[in-house]
Image (tube, grey):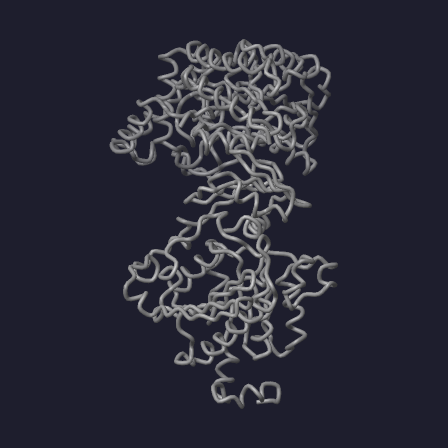
């Protein structure tokens, strides 16, 4: 199979990720910290080592402010629901994943908060001034994707972060599509919270992820329970990361995440990005002037991650997805990509698009093969 | 015993004793179409204790030609078949306390609760997949079930009384691939064959429910009312020969979902995808010919599209299908069973 669905989850993982998880679970599979015996301490150390390694992806200086979660959705819920109070106003965009849209909408529907959605340009970018104009005296949060998952367009987060900081608003970035493939520095970009998932760019397993909680942020924990810390107290401990990390963590996943992130760092984030850019650029160049295809979002590969949304005229994206899968053994992601509003602004609702997302382990031959097949499908009139 | 069941009690095979036993029994009817309407009617009139009617469909005008419990008013009220049948049957015999309408798609997740307590299961379905599922459940729990199927002027029926008789998979080892069988909606059907097969099913159910197992018909009965043929295929020897995966090896591939189709709602779209774990190798040209009277059909080597009033079915060569116009998996499966065949 040619796997071009890396925006959903990267596949395959580096060999070292599989090996690390196998070895870890066979030799160090204790409950971290809780019991105090040798294996428990070793498992705990694995988590703390991973915490240190992952913070390098984002320039986080105080690793205690980095909390492990089970994925980006988990982290986004933790951030949004832990921060916002009755009467608060939040600003977001139409390009967001449902993890952001639905978390906000749930609070809005229960009349806890109000929400403003900022429109994007036709090629998929948010104008910082539009964010600025949406600010009210009640605005407490600006939350948006670094690169939205339908278009992959890299947003001007530094400029928007500055606006947030100047107006004393919390700036929360969903880095699901950029962690591990774009250089990110939470300090330079004025980021107060950052959510990411381990199974995409960081090349780790599913069930891992994290939330950075900046110095300006205090969150109410939405999951309370055992932390292995201050067990006698009835209250959840106030210290980070314990405050937000209740329950037995996904230790084996976290071990795998460390292997994945170390692999990314050893190859270099820029190297990985260059590779994905090259493959995406090849796709864009081959398709952009072919009238049988519609391409969405900017064509400037320096301003996007390795995601390309297209449609073939005369075919529904879901049909193209099935044809690619069953006739040609190529995996892509058709549909709405859990981002219905993004497709509404693109004019591709409700059928969506075919999202092609090459990863670090794809080759130019993979892309050539896909292009041949796309041409074949587009040529067969129905 | 009141007059109500007097003629049936007079009959030598039933008697007072048989009637008493019958009035303690539960039958579950899966599928309330042409076969189901007739057998439900006969069983409710006979005075069983409880009838559960399981059906996922709503009544359409083209049903009225053969589905004897429904009328034009039911259509104007847009009633599910199970509900319309329940209302009608309750009027026919108000003494039966339990006539239950269950508007669902019978599947591996709910079959254990729906068929629980059944003394007999009557097949009124329109597809092999559900029959193979019923066969798994009934063999596993030792419940008799009565296979029935009709198309055109031809009908089939067979009693499966586990562990005594061969089961469905002794006779039919593998399910016909999706999209390769004709259906009533593509090949048509005349009403008398359904009435006949359902009447036989109801008679067999009466025998089973009154513990008259000696009288239960053995083998597969095939009737063609147009060609004037009645054939009985004796199946006793099949069981001994067979290494049946279900009734000899006790592997329940449909109950465990291993061989059962998967339906997924497509992310945010008003569409459902149906996949079969085995896959087919469909000739889309043949399928197009079969569907030409059903709706607007177009195809190329990758896919076939069938446009209906409210829905569109896209079928791919491996039998996979995307059904647009609904988010409801049971509606999608109903359409697939009707037009493509499963």
> Which is nearer the eye, A177 or A191?
A177
- Residue B152 shows up from this direction: yes
Return the x and y of residue A267 as percentages of the image width and height: 37, 12
Return the x and y of residue B88 as percentages of the image width and height: 67, 70
Return the x and y of residue A217 as percentages of the image width and height: 56, 22
> Which is nearer the eye, A8 or B62?
B62
> Which is nearer the eye, B32 or B217?
B217
Q: Quadrant of residue A113?
A: top right
Return the x and y of residue A169 as percentages of the image width and height: 64, 18
Q: Quadrant of residue A294?
A: top right
> Which is nearer the eye, A87 or B208?
B208
At 52% across and 64% down in the image, what residue appears?
Answer: B154
Q: Quadrant of the N terminus of chain B?
A: bottom right
* Residue A339, placed above or below residue A155: below
* Residue A376, placed above or below residue B6: above
At 49% across and 21% down in the image, what residue appears?
Answer: A357
At 62% across and 25% down in the image, what residue appears?
Answer: A313
Figure label count: 0
- Residue A241 shows up from this direction: no
* Residue A33, placed above or below residue B223: above
Question: Could you tell whether A25 is left or right of A60 in the image?
Answer: left
């Amino acid at each position: 199979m040619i796997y071009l669905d890396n925006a959903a989850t990267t596949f395959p993982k580096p060999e070292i990720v599989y090996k690390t998880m196998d070895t870890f679970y066979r030799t160090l599979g204790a409950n971290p910290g809780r019991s105090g015996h040798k294996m428990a301490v070793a498992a705990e150390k694995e988590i703390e080592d991973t915490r240190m390694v992952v913070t390098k992806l984002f320039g986080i200086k105080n690793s205690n402010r980095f909390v492990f979660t089970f994925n980006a959705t988990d982290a986004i819920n933790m951030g949004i629901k832990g921060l916002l109070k009755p009467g608060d106003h939040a600003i977001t965009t139409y390009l967001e994943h449902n993890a952001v849209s639905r978390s906000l909408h749930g609070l809005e529907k229960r009349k806890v908060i109000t929400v403003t959605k900022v429109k994007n340009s036709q090629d998929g970018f948010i104008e910082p001034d539009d964010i600025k104009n949406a600010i009210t005296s009640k605005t407490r949060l600006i939350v948006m994707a670094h690169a939205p998952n339908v278009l992959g367009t890299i947003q001007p987060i530094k400029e928007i972060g500055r606006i947030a900081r100047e107006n004393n608003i919390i700036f929360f970035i969903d880095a699901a599509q950029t962690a591990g493939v774009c250089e990110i520095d939470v300090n330079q970009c004025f980021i107060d919270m950052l959510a990411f998932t381990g199974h995409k760019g960081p090349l780790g397993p599913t069930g891992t992820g994290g939330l950075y909680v900046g110095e300006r942020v205090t969150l109410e924990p939405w999951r309370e329970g055992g932390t292995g810390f201050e067990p006698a107290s009835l209250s959840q401990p106030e210290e980070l990361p314990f405050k937000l990390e209740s329950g037995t963590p996904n230790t084996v996943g976290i071990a795998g995440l460390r292997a994945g992130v170390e692999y990314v760092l050893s190859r270099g984030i820029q190297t990985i990005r260059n590779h994905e850019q090259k493959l995406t650029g090849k796709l864009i160049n081959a398709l952009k002037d072919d009238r049988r295809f519609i391409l969405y979002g900017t064509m400037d590969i320096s301003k996007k991650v390795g995601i390309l949304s297209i449609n073939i005229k005369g075919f529904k994206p879901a049909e193209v997805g099935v044809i690619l899968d069953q006739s040609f053994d190529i995996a892509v992601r058709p549909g709405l990509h859990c981002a219905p509003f993004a497709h509404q602004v693109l004019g591709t609702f409700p059928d969506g698009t075919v999202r092609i997302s090459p990863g670090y382990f794809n080759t130019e031959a993979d892309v050539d093969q896909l292009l041949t097949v796309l041409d074949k499908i587009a040529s067969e009139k129905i | 015993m009141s007059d109500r069941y007097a003629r049936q009690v007079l009959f030598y095979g039933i008697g007072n004793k048989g009637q008493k036993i019958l009035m303690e029994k539960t039958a579950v009817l899966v599928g309330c179409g042409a076969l189901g309407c007739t057998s439900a009617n006969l069983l409710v009139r006979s005075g069983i204790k409880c009838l559960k009617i399981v059906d996922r469909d709503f009544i359409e005008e083209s049903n009225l030609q053969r589905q004897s419990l429904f009328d034009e008013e039911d259509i104007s009220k847009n009633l599910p078949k199970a509900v319309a049948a329940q209302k009608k049957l309750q009027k026919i015999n108000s003494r039966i306390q339990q006539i239950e309408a269950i508007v669902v798609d019978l599947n591996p997740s709910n079959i254990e609760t729906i068929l629980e307590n059944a003394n007999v299961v009557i097949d009124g379905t329109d597809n092999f997949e559900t029959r193979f599922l019923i066969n798994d459940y009934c063999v596993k729990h030792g419940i008799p079930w009565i296979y029935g199927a009709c198309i055109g002027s031809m009908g089939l029926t067979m009693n499966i009384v586990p562990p005594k008789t061969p089961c469905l998979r002794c006779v039919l080892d593998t399910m016909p691939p999706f999209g390769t069988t004709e259906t009533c909606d593509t090949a048509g059907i005349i009403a008398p064959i359904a009435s006949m097969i359902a009447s036989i099913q109801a008679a067999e159910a009466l025998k089973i429910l009154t513990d008259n197992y000696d009288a239960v018909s053995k083998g597969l009965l095939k009737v063609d009312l147009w060609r004037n043929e009645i054939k009985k295929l004796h199946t006793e020897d099949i069981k001994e020969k067979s290494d049946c995966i279900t009734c000899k090896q006790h592997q329940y591939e449909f109950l465990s979902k291993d061989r059962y189709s998967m339906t997924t709602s497509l992310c945010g779209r008003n569409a459902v995808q149906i996949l079969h774990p085995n896959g087919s190798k469909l000739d889309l040209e043949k399928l197009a010919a079969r569907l030409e009277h059903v709706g607007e059909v177009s195809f190329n080597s990758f896919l076939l599209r069938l446009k209906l009033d409210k829905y569109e079915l896209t079928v791919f060569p491996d039998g996979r299908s995307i059904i647009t116009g609904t988010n409801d998996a049971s509606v999608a499966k109903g359409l697939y069973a009707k037009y493509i065949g499963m």
